[in-house]
Amino acid sequence: MADTKAPASDNVVVIGLGRFGGQVAESLAKLGHEVLGIDSDPRIVQDWSDRLTQVVEADATDNETLRQLGVHDFPRAVVGIGTRLEASVLTVLTLAELGVPEIWAKATSAKHGKILSSVGAQHVVYPEAEMGVRVAHLMTGRMLDYIEFDDGFAIAKVRAPAEAVGRSLADVGLRSRWGVTVVGTKLPGQDFTYAQPETVIPNGCILIVAGPTTKVEQFAGTT
Protein backbone atom coordinates (compact mmCIF):
# COMPACT_ATOMS: atom_id res chain seq x y z
CA MET A 1 0.00 0.00 0.00
CA ALA A 2 1.21 3.50 -0.82
CA ASP A 3 2.60 5.80 1.84
CA THR A 4 -0.20 7.82 3.43
CA LYS A 5 1.90 11.00 3.23
CA ALA A 6 0.74 13.23 0.38
CA PRO A 7 3.02 12.86 -2.66
CA ALA A 8 5.19 15.73 -3.83
CA SER A 9 3.79 17.97 -6.53
CA ASP A 10 5.95 16.42 -9.26
CA ASN A 11 5.03 12.79 -8.53
CA VAL A 12 2.84 10.83 -10.91
CA VAL A 13 0.69 7.70 -10.86
CA VAL A 14 0.74 5.69 -14.09
CA ILE A 15 -2.05 3.16 -14.57
CA GLY A 16 -1.47 0.50 -17.20
CA LEU A 17 2.19 -0.37 -17.78
CA GLY A 18 1.96 -1.63 -21.33
CA ARG A 19 4.01 -0.19 -24.18
CA PHE A 20 2.69 3.34 -23.85
CA GLY A 21 2.20 3.55 -20.08
CA GLY A 22 5.46 1.74 -19.41
CA GLN A 23 7.42 4.12 -21.61
CA VAL A 24 5.83 7.14 -19.94
CA ALA A 25 6.53 5.74 -16.47
CA GLU A 26 10.15 4.91 -17.30
CA SER A 27 10.76 8.32 -18.85
CA LEU A 28 9.25 10.09 -15.84
CA ALA A 29 11.45 8.06 -13.50
CA LYS A 30 14.55 8.96 -15.51
CA LEU A 31 13.56 12.62 -15.23
CA GLY A 32 13.62 12.30 -11.46
CA HIS A 33 9.91 11.92 -10.71
CA GLU A 34 8.66 9.40 -8.19
CA VAL A 35 6.23 7.12 -10.01
CA LEU A 36 3.54 4.86 -8.63
CA GLY A 37 2.80 2.23 -11.26
CA ILE A 38 -0.46 0.28 -11.22
CA ASP A 39 -1.37 -2.70 -13.40
CA SER A 40 -3.80 -5.60 -13.10
CA ASP A 41 -1.35 -8.12 -14.59
CA PRO A 42 0.96 -9.66 -11.93
CA ARG A 43 3.61 -10.48 -14.53
CA ILE A 44 3.84 -6.86 -15.62
CA VAL A 45 3.94 -5.71 -12.00
CA GLN A 46 6.81 -8.10 -11.31
CA ASP A 47 8.67 -6.90 -14.39
CA TRP A 48 8.43 -3.25 -13.29
CA SER A 49 8.98 -3.83 -9.56
CA ASP A 50 12.61 -2.70 -9.54
CA ARG A 51 12.28 0.02 -12.16
CA LEU A 52 9.81 2.43 -10.53
CA THR A 53 9.40 3.95 -7.08
CA GLN A 54 6.51 1.61 -6.34
CA VAL A 55 4.48 -0.84 -8.43
CA VAL A 56 1.16 -2.32 -7.33
CA GLU A 57 -1.12 -4.98 -8.74
CA ALA A 58 -4.63 -3.57 -8.49
CA ASP A 59 -7.95 -3.01 -10.22
CA ALA A 60 -7.79 0.67 -11.20
CA THR A 61 -11.53 0.82 -11.89
CA ASP A 62 -12.29 0.33 -8.19
CA ASN A 63 -12.70 3.59 -6.31
CA GLU A 64 -11.89 2.22 -2.86
CA THR A 65 -8.77 0.39 -4.07
CA LEU A 66 -7.30 3.57 -5.54
CA ARG A 67 -8.25 5.52 -2.44
CA GLN A 68 -6.39 3.01 -0.25
CA LEU A 69 -3.35 3.42 -2.47
CA GLY A 70 -3.45 7.18 -1.92
CA VAL A 71 -4.02 7.93 -5.61
CA HIS A 72 -6.34 10.82 -4.72
CA ASP A 73 -3.31 12.66 -3.28
CA PHE A 74 -1.37 12.58 -6.55
CA PRO A 75 -1.47 15.78 -8.62
CA ARG A 76 -1.20 13.91 -11.92
CA ALA A 77 -2.26 10.57 -13.32
CA VAL A 78 -1.59 8.86 -16.63
CA VAL A 79 -3.95 6.17 -17.91
CA GLY A 80 -2.07 4.02 -20.38
CA ILE A 81 -4.87 1.48 -20.90
CA GLY A 82 -5.79 1.46 -24.57
CA THR A 83 -7.21 -1.78 -25.90
CA ARG A 84 -9.64 -2.44 -23.02
CA LEU A 85 -12.06 0.39 -23.69
CA GLU A 86 -14.30 -0.17 -20.67
CA ALA A 87 -11.38 -0.37 -18.25
CA SER A 88 -9.86 2.76 -19.78
CA VAL A 89 -13.05 4.80 -19.40
CA LEU A 90 -13.88 3.52 -15.92
CA THR A 91 -10.35 4.23 -14.70
CA VAL A 92 -10.50 7.83 -15.90
CA LEU A 93 -13.95 8.21 -14.33
CA THR A 94 -12.67 6.81 -11.03
CA LEU A 95 -9.69 9.17 -11.01
CA ALA A 96 -12.00 12.12 -11.71
CA GLU A 97 -14.33 11.07 -8.89
CA LEU A 98 -11.33 10.88 -6.55
CA GLY A 99 -10.47 14.46 -7.47
CA VAL A 100 -7.12 13.89 -9.20
CA PRO A 101 -6.41 17.38 -10.63
CA GLU A 102 -4.71 16.43 -13.89
CA ILE A 103 -5.54 13.28 -15.86
CA TRP A 104 -3.76 12.21 -19.03
CA ALA A 105 -5.24 9.27 -20.96
CA LYS A 106 -4.36 7.22 -24.01
CA ALA A 107 -7.03 6.87 -26.69
CA THR A 108 -7.13 4.52 -29.66
CA SER A 109 -9.74 6.41 -31.66
CA ALA A 110 -11.48 9.77 -31.86
CA LYS A 111 -14.64 8.33 -30.30
CA HIS A 112 -12.61 6.77 -27.47
CA GLY A 113 -10.91 10.11 -26.87
CA LYS A 114 -14.23 11.95 -26.81
CA ILE A 115 -15.54 9.58 -24.15
CA LEU A 116 -12.39 9.96 -22.06
CA SER A 117 -12.70 13.75 -22.18
CA SER A 118 -16.38 13.58 -21.20
CA VAL A 119 -15.66 11.52 -18.07
CA GLY A 120 -12.79 13.66 -16.80
CA ALA A 121 -9.56 13.42 -18.82
CA GLN A 122 -8.03 16.87 -19.35
CA HIS A 123 -5.43 15.58 -21.81
CA VAL A 124 -6.12 12.85 -24.37
CA VAL A 125 -3.20 11.36 -26.25
CA TYR A 126 -3.38 9.43 -29.53
CA PRO A 127 0.11 7.85 -29.67
CA GLU A 128 -0.41 5.64 -32.72
CA ALA A 129 -2.06 8.36 -34.80
CA GLU A 130 0.45 11.03 -33.74
CA MET A 131 3.41 8.79 -34.44
CA GLY A 132 1.95 7.87 -37.82
CA VAL A 133 1.68 11.53 -38.79
CA ARG A 134 5.19 12.24 -37.53
CA VAL A 135 6.73 9.31 -39.42
CA ALA A 136 4.95 10.33 -42.62
CA HIS A 137 6.48 13.79 -42.35
CA LEU A 138 9.95 12.46 -41.61
CA MET A 139 9.91 10.01 -44.52
CA THR A 140 9.62 12.72 -47.13
CA GLY A 141 11.41 15.92 -48.04
CA ARG A 142 14.12 17.57 -45.91
CA MET A 143 12.35 17.26 -42.56
CA LEU A 144 14.32 15.64 -39.72
CA ASP A 145 11.94 16.20 -36.81
CA TYR A 146 8.44 17.59 -36.44
CA ILE A 147 6.04 18.76 -33.74
CA GLU A 148 2.52 19.89 -34.55
CA PHE A 149 0.38 21.79 -32.06
CA ASP A 150 -3.42 21.78 -31.76
CA ASP A 151 -3.91 25.25 -33.22
CA GLY A 152 -2.42 24.63 -36.65
CA PHE A 153 1.12 25.61 -35.66
CA ALA A 154 4.22 23.48 -36.15
CA ILE A 155 7.94 23.45 -35.43
CA ALA A 156 10.33 21.40 -37.53
CA LYS A 157 14.00 20.57 -37.87
CA VAL A 158 14.83 20.83 -41.56
CA ARG A 159 17.90 20.47 -43.73
CA ALA A 160 18.80 23.86 -45.16
CA PRO A 161 17.90 24.12 -48.85
CA ALA A 162 20.87 24.31 -51.23
CA GLU A 163 19.78 27.75 -52.48
CA ALA A 164 20.18 29.17 -48.96
CA VAL A 165 23.75 27.97 -48.30
CA GLY A 166 26.23 30.83 -47.97
CA ARG A 167 23.53 33.46 -47.77
CA SER A 168 22.08 35.38 -44.82
CA LEU A 169 18.55 34.76 -43.62
CA ALA A 170 17.62 38.31 -44.57
CA ASP A 171 18.90 37.71 -48.09
CA VAL A 172 17.14 34.36 -48.48
CA GLY A 173 13.83 35.78 -47.23
CA LEU A 174 12.26 32.53 -46.06
CA ARG A 175 9.50 34.30 -44.15
CA SER A 176 8.34 36.35 -47.13
CA ARG A 177 8.68 33.44 -49.56
CA TRP A 178 7.44 30.54 -47.46
CA GLY A 179 5.69 32.08 -44.47
CA VAL A 180 7.97 30.36 -41.94
CA THR A 181 10.27 31.81 -39.29
CA VAL A 182 13.77 30.44 -38.73
CA VAL A 183 14.16 30.13 -34.96
CA GLY A 184 17.74 28.90 -35.00
CA THR A 185 20.50 27.06 -36.83
CA LYS A 186 22.58 24.04 -35.91
CA LEU A 187 25.71 22.45 -37.34
CA PRO A 188 26.67 18.89 -36.37
CA GLY A 189 28.88 18.97 -33.27
CA GLN A 190 28.22 22.64 -32.60
CA ASP A 191 25.87 24.51 -30.29
CA PHE A 192 22.42 25.70 -31.32
CA THR A 193 22.48 29.32 -32.50
CA TYR A 194 19.48 31.63 -32.32
CA ALA A 195 18.75 33.04 -35.74
CA GLN A 196 19.26 36.71 -36.61
CA PRO A 197 18.62 38.43 -39.96
CA GLU A 198 22.38 38.54 -40.54
CA THR A 199 22.88 34.85 -39.77
CA VAL A 200 24.65 33.15 -42.68
CA ILE A 201 23.57 29.61 -43.45
CA PRO A 202 26.63 27.33 -43.79
CA ASN A 203 26.77 24.10 -45.78
CA GLY A 204 25.35 21.13 -43.87
CA CYS A 205 23.31 23.40 -41.61
CA ILE A 206 20.04 22.37 -40.00
CA LEU A 207 17.30 24.98 -39.60
CA ILE A 208 14.71 25.02 -36.83
CA VAL A 209 11.66 26.62 -38.40
CA ALA A 210 8.23 27.51 -37.03
CA GLY A 211 4.96 28.64 -38.55
CA PRO A 212 1.53 27.52 -39.71
CA THR A 213 1.51 23.75 -40.26
CA THR A 214 0.82 23.92 -43.99
CA LYS A 215 3.58 26.49 -44.51
CA VAL A 216 6.13 24.41 -42.58
CA GLU A 217 5.17 21.30 -44.56
CA GLN A 218 5.45 23.14 -47.86
CA PHE A 219 8.85 24.57 -46.96
CA ALA A 220 10.11 21.14 -45.92
CA GLY A 221 8.99 19.68 -49.25
CA THR A 222 6.40 17.33 -47.77
CA THR A 223 3.39 18.53 -49.74
Image (spheres, rainbow, N blue to C red):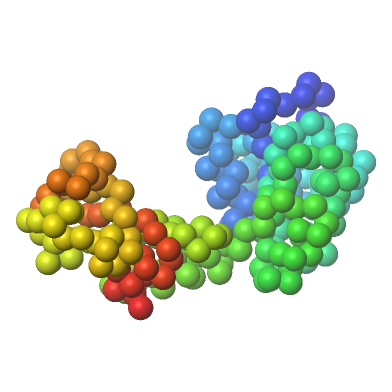
Outermost residue toward the left in this view: 166
In the rendered structure, the answer to whether residue 13 lies left or right of residue 206 reads right
* Identity of the residue drawn at 77% across and 45% down: 57
Quadrant location, the C terminus = bottom left
In the rendered structure, the answer to whether residue 16 lies left or right of residue 22 reads right
In the depicted structure, whether residue 105 falls above or below residue 57:
below
Residue 143 appears in the rendering: no
* Identity of the residue drawn at 76% across and 58% down: 117
In the rendered structure, the answer to whether residue 174 lies left or right of residue 25 reads left
Outermost residue toward the top in this view: 5
Q: Position of residue 20 (x, y in %)?
A: 59, 56
Q: How many marks?
A: 0
* Identity of the residue drawn at 92% across and 41% down: 64
**Which one is in front, 105 or 30?**
105
Outermost residue toward the front in this view: 176
Q: Position of residue 4 (x, y in %)?
A: 82, 24
**Which one is in front, 20 or 136?**
136
Quadrant location, the N terminus = top right
Q: Quadrant of residue 113?
A: bottom right
In the depicted structure, whether residue 13 falls above or below residue 143:
above
* Identity of the residue drawn at 47% across and 70% down: 133
Q: Position of residue 164 (x, y in %)?
A: 14, 61
Q: Position of residue 211 (x, y in %)?
A: 39, 59
Outermost residue toward the right in this view: 64
Residue 185 appears in the rendering: yes
In the rendered structure, the answer to whether residue 131 lies left or right of residue 139 reads right
